[in-house]
């Protein structure tokens, strides 16, 4: 056992407490400090016998969460006290009533909200993790500070996950990327969002993460020198004008670099905007703030040519998160694009601490802010309880991460909408009654279809009629969850009645098949019939669209496929010798077959076409409803959603050497059209042992060579060797492996 030096530990705890008071973003009064001290003492006493998996005293966790709440989010004494107490109700004998008695109703309410979230996340019987997220998001109705403190809690947990099992790390990291990082983004907590995304990548794709970190370290010295060259030029002009400012380099986050590499199918070296310059200036007079930003813009563009298509003016039209800044992309030395961000100190504080903290809780503003508008829209969405949980979370995420456009009403009022919104979305953003009665829309004076996609700067007029009603097609005309919810509510008035009758009918029909209707059975039926919601299911039963034979088919597959898998784990027909061999150390490099779980079980599986895995790829198994186990790459575009929503269906998978199966891989090649290139290419491929060319397609266009080669390989090691050899051919520019989307 590790011997613990309690005296040293107590000193460290006291030091952490002093640090908490020192780094608080808000000025703490004597009363505030007394409140925080009392919360600290209660938390220390409540957690005195608890330790984390790493072995350290548990109290270090609530203190760390309180420090994030105090410094990075910028909340006040009430929230700091709630952060210190956030685990006492869940993990100790203390109750919410005890906290209300010792402190006040507001702190008790915050701690109760945080406890509810934790209990929701531990509900392992929930059919979908998405349903848990929906319940968690409901807490936003009470007080947004509950979610802000929860984000701080999640950040510290992500920072201290090293001692956890790998499968738990993957699950928690997937949840973080799926819901918590988008929430931090939408609440204006850009620093926390970035940290959550980077840590999420660290545990979902550790190899890629470590490669990017290593590359960043390798190029840091060169980038620092490059940033200094640009800064020196800009500083000279700004000093001459007497502007009070600070310039710093801002490296692009590891997650952003990874996302760009995937989206553009490029290597690390080909990501051109791996860093940005940030100019933060002082403005003593609020009236001069905007003028100074454009003055700095003028100075920057005097030296470096700007890209007109990449100018972002978030000062004239702030984001709905409260973010304000001027973003300029300029052509720097050596022909590299560089983003320059211009912010006042006030704008920088909002960007760093978050809109909710800076305005709603720091200044006590009473006017309806952008965040309040967003929360009101969220409450409307939450009222629609009929929505399938996964669809709800997907819609919610879309609204969290969507980029914004700014359009005008006929009277010149500005409205913010997510990018991709239509003229019908605009009608619903004005008022749901206007949306429901929309007969037509004019954009910039011209009559346009209801599904016309709006652009920033458009002026939109809505034409209404008392006799107009939504049709089912309208759901295809809108993108915002608010519009979809309102349209569905109108359409569902009649559907609900039929659905209620259908539910009763379905209960009776399933009873004949010896199946009891439950939430899990409803979810299985929704998936079996490829529907979206339970209402869709009940409605189709009510109108007779689902026949008795189809329900019998469901009952048969339920007993034959899904249950049998979990009960008996269908094993491949293999000899007993092969079964014994699975547990032997792997010596060969030919990984060509999968085994599952800790016991290395041999189970039937299919390779998923969405990411086309081949032996040697990092993979996992996913238990589907109708198709057994599907194998996905760990960096599959669908992996985060599956690992987050359906963690109970994930199986660990490992490649072993036990057969000589072969797999198909598609390689795309581009380069310069050099004489003899085709011959060299086929020679290099055929020279790689165990590689057969199934098909080859080559063409040239104005001196550029494009080729697609489909090869049959035994594993990823051989494929990587072949790709590296192709890259060495003179004239070849890029070689990439194709995945289906």
Image (cartoon, grey):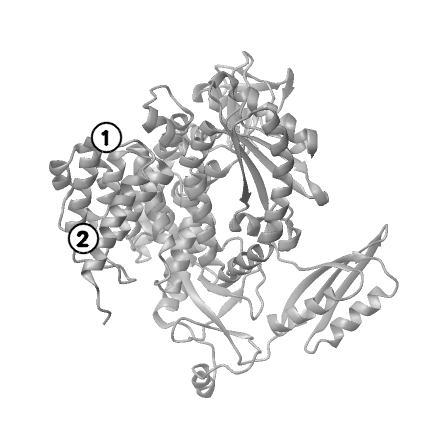
Q: Image quadrant for the N terminus?
A: bottom left
Q: How many marks?
A: 2
Residue under pointer 1: 29
Q: Is residue 294 left or right of residue 121?
A: right
Is residue 235 depicted above or below 723 in this figure?
Answer: above
Give the image quarter of residue 505: top left
Position in image of residue 577 (x %, y %): 46, 88
Depth check: give the residue in front, 542 or 374.
374
Position in image of residue 683 (x %, y %): 79, 73
Position in image of residue 184 (x %, y %): 41, 40
Residue sitting farthest toward the top = 411
Q: Is residue 116 visible?
A: no
Position in image of residue 431 (x %, y %): 44, 20
- Describe the element under mark 2 as helix, strand or loop: loop
What residue do we see at 57% from left, 33% from top?
A: 420
Cα gap from disc 2 to disc 1, whole angstroms:
27 Å
Residue under pointer 2: 47
């Amino acid at each position: 056992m590790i011997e613990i030096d309690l005296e040293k530990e107590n000193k460290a705890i006291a030091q952490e407490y002093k640090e908490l008071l020192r780094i608080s973003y808000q000025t703490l009064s004597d009363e505030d400090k007394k409140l925080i001290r009392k919360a600290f003492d209660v938390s220390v006493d409540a957690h005195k016998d608890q330790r984390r998996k790493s072995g350290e005293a548990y109290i270090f966790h609530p203190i760390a969460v309180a420090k994030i709440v105090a410094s990075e989010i910028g909340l006040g004494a009430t929230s700091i006290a709630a952060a210190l107490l956030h685990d006492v109700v869940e993990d100790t004998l203390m109750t919410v009533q005890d906290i209300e008695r010792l402190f006040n109703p507001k702190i008790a309410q915050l701690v109760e909200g945080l406890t509810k979230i934790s209990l929701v996340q531990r509900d392992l019987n929930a059919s979908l993790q998405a349903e848990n997220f929906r319940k968690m998001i409901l807490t936003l109705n009470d007080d947004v500070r509950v979610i802000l403190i929860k984000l701080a809690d999640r950040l510290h947990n992500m920072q201290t996950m090293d001692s956890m099992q790998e499968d738990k790390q993957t699950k928690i990291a997937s949840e973080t990327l799926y819901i918590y990082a988008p929430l931090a983004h939408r609440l204006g907590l850009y620093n926390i969002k970035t940290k959550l995304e980077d840590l999420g990548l660290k545990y979902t794709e550790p190899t890629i993460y470590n490669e990017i970190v290593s590359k960043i370290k390798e190029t840091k010295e060169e980038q620092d020198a490059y940033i200094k060259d640009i800064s020196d030029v800009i500083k000279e002009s700004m000093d001459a004008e007497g502007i009070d400012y600070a310039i710093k380099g801002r490296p692009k986050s590891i997650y952003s670099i990874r996302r760009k590499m995937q989206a553009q199918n490029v290597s690390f070296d080909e990501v051109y905007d791996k860093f940005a310059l940030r100019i933060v200036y002082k403005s003593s007079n609020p009236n001069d703030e905007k003028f100074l930003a454009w003055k700095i813009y003028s100075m920057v563009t005097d030296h470096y040519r700007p890209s007109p298509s990449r100018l972002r003016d978030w000062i004239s039209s702030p984001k709905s998160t409260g973010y304000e800044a001027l973003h300029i992309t300029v052509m720097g030395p050596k022909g590299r694009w560089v983003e320059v961000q211009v912010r006042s100190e006030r704008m920088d504080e909002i960007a760093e601490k978050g809109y909710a903290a800076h305005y709603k809780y720091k200044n006590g503003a009473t006017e309806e802010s952008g965040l309040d508008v967003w929360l009101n829209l969220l409450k409307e969405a939450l009222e629609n309880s009929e929505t399938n949980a996964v669809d709800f979370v997907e819609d919610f995420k879309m609204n969290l991460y969507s980029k914004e456009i700014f359009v005008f009403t006929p009277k010149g009022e500005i409205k913010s909408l997510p990018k991709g919104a239509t003229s019908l979305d605009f009608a619903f953003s004005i008022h749901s009654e206007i949306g429901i009665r929309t007969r037509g829309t004019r954009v910039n004076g011209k009559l346009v279809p209801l599904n016309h996609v709006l652009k920033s700067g458009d002026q939109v007029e809505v034409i209404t009629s008392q006799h107009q009603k939504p049709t089912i097609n309208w759901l295809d005309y809108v993108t915002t969850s608010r519009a979809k919810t309102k349209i569905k509510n109108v359409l569902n008035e009649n559907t609900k009645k039929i659905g209620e009758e259908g539910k009763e009918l379905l209960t009776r029909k399933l009873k004949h098949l010896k199946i009891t209707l439950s939430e899990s059975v409803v979810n299985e039926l929704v998936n079996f019939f490829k529907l979206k919601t339970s209402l869709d299911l009940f409605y189709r039963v009510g109108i007779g669209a689902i026949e008795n034979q189809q329900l019998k088919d469901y009952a048969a597959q339920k007993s034959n496929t899904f249950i049998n898998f979990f009960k008996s784990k269908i094993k491949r027909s293999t000899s007993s010798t092969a079964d014994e061999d699975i547990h032997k150390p792997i010596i060969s490099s030919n990984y060509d077959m999968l085994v599952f779980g800790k016991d290395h079980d041999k189970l039937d599986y299919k390779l998923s076409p969405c990411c086309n895995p081949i032996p040697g790829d990092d993979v996992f198994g996913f238990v589907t409803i109708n198709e057994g186990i599907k194998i996905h790459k760990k960096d599959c575009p669908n992996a985060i959603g599956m690992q987050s929503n359906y963690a109970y269906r994930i199986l660990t998978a490992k490649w072993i050497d036990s057969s000589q199966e072969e797999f198909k891989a598609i390689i795309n090649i581009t380069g310069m059209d050099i004489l003899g290139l085709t011959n060299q290419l086929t020679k290099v491929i055929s020279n790689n042992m165990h590689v057969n060319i199934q098909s080859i397609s080559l063409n040239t266009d104005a001196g550029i060579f494009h080729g697609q080669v489909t090869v049959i390989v035994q594993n990823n090691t051989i494929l990587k060797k072949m790709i590296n050899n192709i890259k060495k051919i003179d004239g070849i520019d890029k070689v990439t492996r194709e995945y289906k989307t």
